[in-house]
Amino acid sequence: MSRQLIPADLEEYAVDYTTAESSVLAALNRETNMKVPQAVMLSGHLQGAFLAMVSHMVQPKRILEIGTYTGYSAICLAQGLQPGGILHTIEIDEELYDITHKYITQAGLSGKVIHHIGNAPDIIPTLNETFDLVFIDADKPNYEYYFHLVFNKLRIGGYILADNVLYEGDVLLPIEKQSKNARGISSFNKMIKEDSRIEHVLLPIRDGLMLVRKIQD
């Protein structure tokens, strides 16, 4: 996300009136921005707090995250897990494992987070789980594919969250002027709008979050 959609002063105001980051999340935020390429991919304080709030409301037993990056969103999502609950998170970049593992451990979540390294389309079919909450934040052209891949593993009444669904505002451009990523997101949003099996709301938080509730198989 290279272009900020919400004016910086308004976002700062929103952050100021949001529960503060934990010390672990603040340290992870800082280290990611200092050492990891494309640090803009980090969920960050405001979006992370929203993810944690959704998780607390849903009180999931099982969460699936597609796209771990350095683990900020995984730590936030895991906050609402029921006792004995598990979050499966999938990341293709094995070089991010060490930083992710360090902060998940510091957050006291080692027993609640299963960190998979590899291709999501290979890993998801091997997970014998029914999920209450799914977070999609991976390669944008494959959002539709990931949605279909997880839908049958999501319980009725369960939720899917998808990140970057405004894609820096490029979804407003004519399709021929959109990048490959923006076209993938535009196609995903259209699919969501037309799917009668779900209810959904697009929230203009950060780069856009699509919140989906499954109402039928």
Image (tube, rainbow, N blue to C red):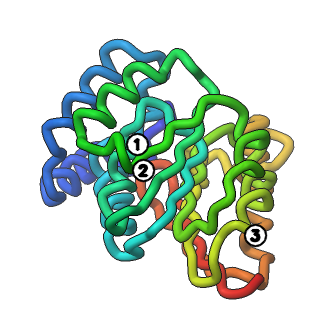
Marks 2 and 1 sit apart, C-alpha to C-alpha, by: 9 Å
- Dots 3, 1 in contact, CB < 8 A: no
Placement of 103 over or under 58, stated as above or below: above
Asked whether residue 178 is in view, the answer is no
Question: Mark 1: which amino acid?
Answer: Ser
Measure the alpha-carbon separation of dots 3 and 1.
26 Å
Looking at the picture, tell me which residue is in the foreground, 81 or 70: 81
Residue kind at label 3, given as amino acid type: Asn
Provide the residue designation for mark 2: 206
Badge 1 density bin: few <14, some 14–19, many ≥20, Cα 10 Å: many
* Closer to us: 53 or 185: 53
**Residue located 79% across and 66% down the image:** 191
| Residue 216 screen position, x and y as percent | 73, 86
Q: Is residue 126 visible in the rendered structure shown here? A: yes
To which residue does mark 1 refer? 43
Q: Residue drawn 78% across and 77% down?
A: 195
Q: Decide: marks 2, 1 in contact (CB < 8 A)?
A: yes
Residue 15, percent from left and from top: 21, 51
Is residue 92 shown left or right of residue 146?
Answer: left
> Which callout, 2 or 1, points to the residue nearer the camera?
1
Q: Amino acid at mark 2?
A: Arg
Q: Residue, x 62% and y 68% (percent of image)?
A: 130
Q: Is residue 106 left or right of residue 187?
A: left
Q: Tag 1, which secondary structure?
A: loop
Query: Which of labels 2 and 3 is toward the front?
Result: 3
Earlier sequence position, callout 2 versus callout 3 = 3
* Above or below, comparing residue 25 to residue 134 in the picture: above
Q: Which residue is mark 3?
A: 152
